[in-house]
């Protein structure tokens, strides 16, 4: 447990200083395709299935992870990969199918209500409570890039994009056959195969993957399977239609949580009352997308999709409570698209107008039972509800000069739906949140080709999750949505192809923030109150030589409750739980020879509070180092080794159950090896 003080964030002038230093830097060298994005690893941009995946005109903190970094990682779930990106907080529950989450911008990853909009190949991929469960169905070898968009600026995304968005693009072009077979610590073993073929205007891409592990802790076994396909057809020279399909299944045991004393003395232990905890989950996704140029100076994209989520979980948090069976079934379907017009030559340097729309329906069944060793004893929840979201946006990219871009935008969302509690015989409609307006504006000035100074403002929103979105009796009045207003100023500097750096200061203020979906029988949402978040981010990478690259990132952040819910007055002025005030990462990549590549990376965070009154101590600080080596045996086969938690650091996830802290210890040092073959 750490009692370190939070870093001060009272000097946003640091960004101004960084901007001044950048403007007097080295010689002006233009960067092709320059934007405010920060790349981790060598990123190769390929044609996307549809154009709305592009962040070319989103001038905020955008970060991307290359496939070369991704494919070498040994992970149980895809959400872990986002930990390689700046400013991202990983929350590792390590509880079977409920493995963990990531978050950003001083929001926590506790999971009842998530603050990040997730897209997989442009398809919305959040569950009804905002969770990022659909990420489980993606494996590293099929990914072409990961991307996070931090902040409130992006008008393309609405519901769930409270703190920003995250996108995965899977492979879509080329002729290849890649295989990866691996084994390692805690009984880990895996196999992945990805294949692609391209001829004429036709593209085929396929993937199958499997991973199993016995787990670091007792009763922590996991086995997961996934398969996907992508088929694309060119429609002449000006368009392409793509079909996507994905299926996934996982079965896993849950080791449960330990007391503080047991977590330190016997971290691999699992209590006897958790012996029948665990669950299984299946996911599917299908979509059809179009991207093309329907007319002169016009470009368009659209996608229609359907997702399913079927989850069964048995869980018992402590010996004093009953085991629960939690069943969740969701069917989602919808469509989204955009149309862009680029003005011909005129008095402006450039002008682009864009309009987009989306519609999503979520049909949810939520049931819960009290059980004993997985045998049902009584039912505590039986709810059926649907949530409908309609969103429209417009945006203009105005370039008065070649050095200045002004990007005003506006988005509006509507929420609708119906709720039925079959146990209580109660029905209700969704709150009338009205038209939720979200103004957006950004400006970017390029005084030199290698320096970009930008600022932005935007609003995002949040509504209740689960039954918290419906006017269930005795609730009578409608609610306002929680409005989250944020702004950011930053600077990015590039030097040839050897150096990139970005610094930014940001703030976000929310009204009536919803903290979480409660685990009571009703599944209601808890109000946190008026909140304020702010932070300073800096990241840089530098090619010391053609063979050596170093990189690093630091986030200093605060998340405070300014006006709490009247039911919790002791939270006034306190820090929001499970939000570290410092996140840092860095590393070095060394191409030691033509065949040998070595890498070392470090991630760290300081401690966090466990609940809103900040009276139960601070936990969760760590410094974790990972080492990687890859050796190319020949032109086809590469041998890869990864050592996780190189220094054998003790770390854990901790939460407060109302009476005591409960702990989920993380893995000690582990070695993982794999053979990678490319044909």
Image (spheres, rainbow, N blue to C red):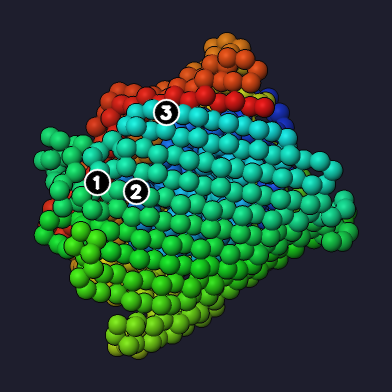
Work out how far the residue at label 3 is from the one at label 2, CA to CA, in angstroms: 18 Å
Q: Which residue is mark 3?
A: 183
Work out how far the residue at label 1 is from the one at label 2, CA to CA, in angstroms: 10 Å
Q: Disc 3 or 2, which lies upstream in sequence?
A: 3
Specify few, some or many for label 3: CA neighbours under 10 Å numbering under 14, 14-19, or 20 or more.
many
Q: Residue furthest front?
A: 375
Residue at screen point 70% across, 66% down: 355
Q: Which mark is residue 255?
A: 1
Q: Which residue is mark 2?
A: 252
Proximity of marks 3 and 2: CB atoms separated by less than 8 Å: no
Residue 639 image position (x, y, % from top left): 52, 20
Specify few, some or many for label 2: CA neighbours under 10 Å numbering under 14, 14-19, or 20 or more.
many
Viewer can see residue 284: yes
Query: Circle 2 sits in a helix, a strand or a loop, which is it?
Result: strand
How many numbered marks appear?
3
Give the quarter of the image for residue 24.
Answer: top right
Proximity of marks 1 and 2: CB atoms separated by less than 8 Å: no
109 left or right, relative to 283: left
324 left or right, relative to 337: left
**With respect to residue 630, does 301 lie above or below?**
below
Q: Disc 1 vs disc 3: which is toward the camera? A: 3
Residue at screen point 39% across, 69% down: 465
């Amino acid at each position: 447990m750490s009692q370190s003080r939070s870093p001060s964030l009272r000097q946003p002038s640091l960004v101004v200083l960084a901007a001044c230093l950048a403007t007097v830097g080295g010689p002006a060298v233009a960067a092709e395709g320059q934007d405010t994005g920060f790349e981790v690893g060598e990123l190769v941009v390929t044609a996307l299935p549809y154009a709305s995946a592009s962040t070319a005109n989103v001038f905020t903190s955008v970060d991307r992870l290359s496939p070369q970094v991704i494919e070498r990682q040994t992970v149980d779930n895809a959400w872990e990969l986002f930990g390689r990106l700046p400013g991202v907080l990983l929350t590792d529950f390590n509880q079977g199918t409920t493995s963990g989450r990531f978050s950003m911008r001083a929001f926590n990853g506790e999971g009842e209500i998530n603050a990040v909009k997730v897209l997989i190949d442009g398809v919305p991929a959040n569950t009804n409570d905002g969770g990022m469960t659909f990420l489980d169905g993606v494996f590293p070898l099929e990914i072409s890039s990961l991307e996070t968009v931090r902040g409130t600026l992006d008008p393309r995304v609405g519901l769930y994009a409270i703190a920003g968005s995250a996108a995965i693009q899977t492979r879509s072009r080329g002729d290849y056959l890649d295989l990866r077979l691996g084994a390692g610590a805690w009984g880990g073993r895996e196999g992945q195969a990805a294949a692609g073929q391209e001829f004429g205007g036709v593209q085929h891409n396929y993937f199958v993957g499997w991973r199993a592990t016995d787990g670091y802790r007792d009763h922590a076994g996991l086995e997961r399977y996934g398969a996907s396909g992508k088929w694309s057809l060119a429609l002449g020279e000006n368009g392409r239609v793509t079909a996507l399909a994905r299926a996934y299944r996982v079965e896993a045991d849950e080791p449960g949580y330990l007391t503080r004393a047991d977590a330190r003395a016997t971290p691999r232990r699992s209590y006897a009352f958790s012996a029948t905890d665990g669950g299984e989950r299946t996911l599917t996704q299908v979509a059809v997308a179009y991207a093309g140029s329907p007319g002169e100076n016009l470009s368009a994209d659209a996608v229609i999709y359907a997702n399913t989520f079927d989850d069964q979980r048995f869980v018992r948090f402590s010996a004093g409570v009953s085991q629960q069976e939690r069943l969740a079934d969701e069917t989602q379907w919808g469509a989204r698209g955009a149309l862009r017009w680029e003005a011909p030559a005129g008095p402006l340097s450039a002008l682009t107008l864009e309009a987009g729309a989306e519609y999503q329906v979520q049909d949810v069944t939520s049931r819960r039972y009290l059980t004993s060793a997985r045998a049902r004893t009584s039912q505590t929840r039986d709810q059926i509800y649907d949530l409908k979201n309609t969103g429209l946006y417009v945006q203009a990219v105005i370039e008065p000069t070649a050095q200045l871009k002004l990007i005003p935008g506006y988005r509006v969302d509507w929420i609708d739906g119906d709720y039925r509690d079959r146990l209580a015989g109660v029905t209700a409609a969704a709150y009338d949140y009205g038209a939720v307006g979200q103004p957006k504006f950004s400006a970017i000035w390029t005084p030199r080709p290698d320096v970009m100074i930008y600022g932005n403002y935007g609003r995002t929103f949040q509504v209740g999750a689960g039954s918290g979105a419906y006017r269930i009796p005795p609730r009578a009045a409608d609610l306002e949505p929680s409005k989250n207003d944020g702004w950011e100023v930053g600077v990015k500097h590039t030097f040839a192809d050897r150096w990139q750096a970005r610094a930014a200061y940001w703030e976000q203020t929310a009204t009536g923030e919803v903290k979480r979906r409660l685990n009571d029988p009703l599944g209601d949402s808890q109000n946190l109150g008026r909140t304020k978040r702010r932070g300073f981010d800096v990241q840089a990478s530098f090619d010391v030589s053609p063979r050596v690259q170093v990189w690093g990132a630091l986030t200093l952040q605060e998340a405070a409750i300014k006006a709490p819910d009247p039911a919790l007055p002791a939270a006034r002025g306190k820090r929001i739980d499970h939000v570290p005030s410092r996140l840092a990462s860095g590393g070095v990549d060394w191409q030691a020879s033509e065949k040998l590549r070595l890498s070392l990376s470090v991630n760290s965070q300081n401690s966090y509070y466990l609940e809103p009154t900040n009276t139960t101590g601070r936990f969760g600080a760590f410094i974790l180092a990972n080492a990687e080596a890859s050796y190319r045996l020949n032109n086809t086969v590469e041998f890869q080794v990864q050592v996780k938690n190189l220094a054998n650091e003790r770390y854990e996830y901790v939460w407060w159950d109302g009476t005591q802290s409960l702990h989920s210890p993380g893995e000690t040092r582990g070695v993982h090896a794999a053979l990678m073959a490319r044909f």
